[in-house]
Image: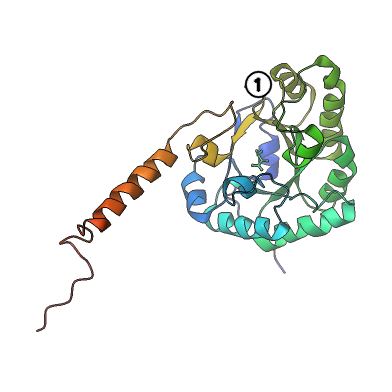
Amino acid sequence: MSAQIDSKRVSVPEIRAHKNAKPVVCLTCYHAHTAKLLDSHVDVMLVGDSLGMVIHGLETTLGVTLEMMILHGQAVMRGAKKALVVVDMPFGSYEESPQVAFRNAARLLAETGCQAVKLEGGSAMAETIAYLTTRGIPVMAHIGLTPQRIQIFGGFKTQGRTEAEWPAIEADAKAIAEAGAFAVVLEGMAEPLAAKITRDIAIPTIGIGASAECDGQILVMEDMLGLNPSPPKFVRQYASMGPDIEAAVKAYAAEVRSRSFPGKENVYAMKKAV
Ligand code: KIV
């Protein structure tokens, strides 16, 4: 049997090679059609478990299931032909043991065709990251503000705002890099700490609400497109699609109600009898 490897797609070693080089451009993505639009502009698409909040309207990411991640991962893979696609491991699918993590990560790779998985956690997840990577599953790590631990943090709170917090977070970064993660997301982290970690570890850091000095950046697509009415404070919006969608729907509804749609151009008009 010969494995089909798409040589045009961005690879895990190519992302690793961005360390101290050109910044890695990453965005979250959850659907096939947006994946097509993003594909030639980003290096990495993350099918993030943030989909629970921005697509499914959940309060947190804790209710996201492996089946939801597989469904959205399959959709994104139908649209993404060039970018590296990473799928998040949802809460409860990897923390119990490296073996459980392997079984669920293998499902994500086999059933979606994605290239890598992402999981949250530092030193406590190092053994699991080593277990997965030595068995063929590339892992992107995620430290700092890890939304799956929101109940422990007591809210979406920036990490490392006092220097007393730094040693534990730095130890997390070193542990996951040594365990074999190919990149790490630094989320909601005090700027000087994120910059220091970026200087100190050998794998690319991908910032979100962290530091411009990270080796790359990621945003939640719905936040940067203006589809989330209350995005995090650090988000820069590059479009205002929420108001645009509302204006378009309002115009359509007005035309339907005044019977001016469909108009004379009606494509469903009857054919003339011959
Ligand atoms: O789930 C997600 O979208 C993420 C990003 C915020 C990095 O983990």
Q: Is residue 260 above or below residue 84?
A: below
Q: What residue does disc 1 label?
A: 213
Total number of numbered discs in the rendering: 1
The residue lying at 42 percent from left, 36 percent from top is 240
Looking at the picture, tell me which residue is in the foreground, 196 or 165: 165
The residue lying at 79 percent from left, 32 percent from top is 153
- Which quadrant does the N terminus fall into? bottom right
Q: Is residue 107 above or below residue 164?
A: below
Give the x, y percent position of residue 175: 87, 33
Give the x, y percent position of residue 28: 59, 43
The residue lying at 71 percent from left, 62 percent from top is 110
Looking at the picture, tell me which residue is in the foreground, 213 or 263: 263
- Which quadrant does the C terminus fall into? bottom left
Q: Residue 230 appears in which quarter of the rendering? A: top right
Answer yes or no: is residue 96 visible: yes
Residue type at tag 1: Glu
Q: Quadrant of ligand 1?
A: top right
Looking at the picture, tell me which residue is in the foreground, 51 or 75: 51
| In the displayed structure image, the side of residue 229 where residue 73 appears, left or right | right
Give the x, y percent position of residue 90: 74, 50
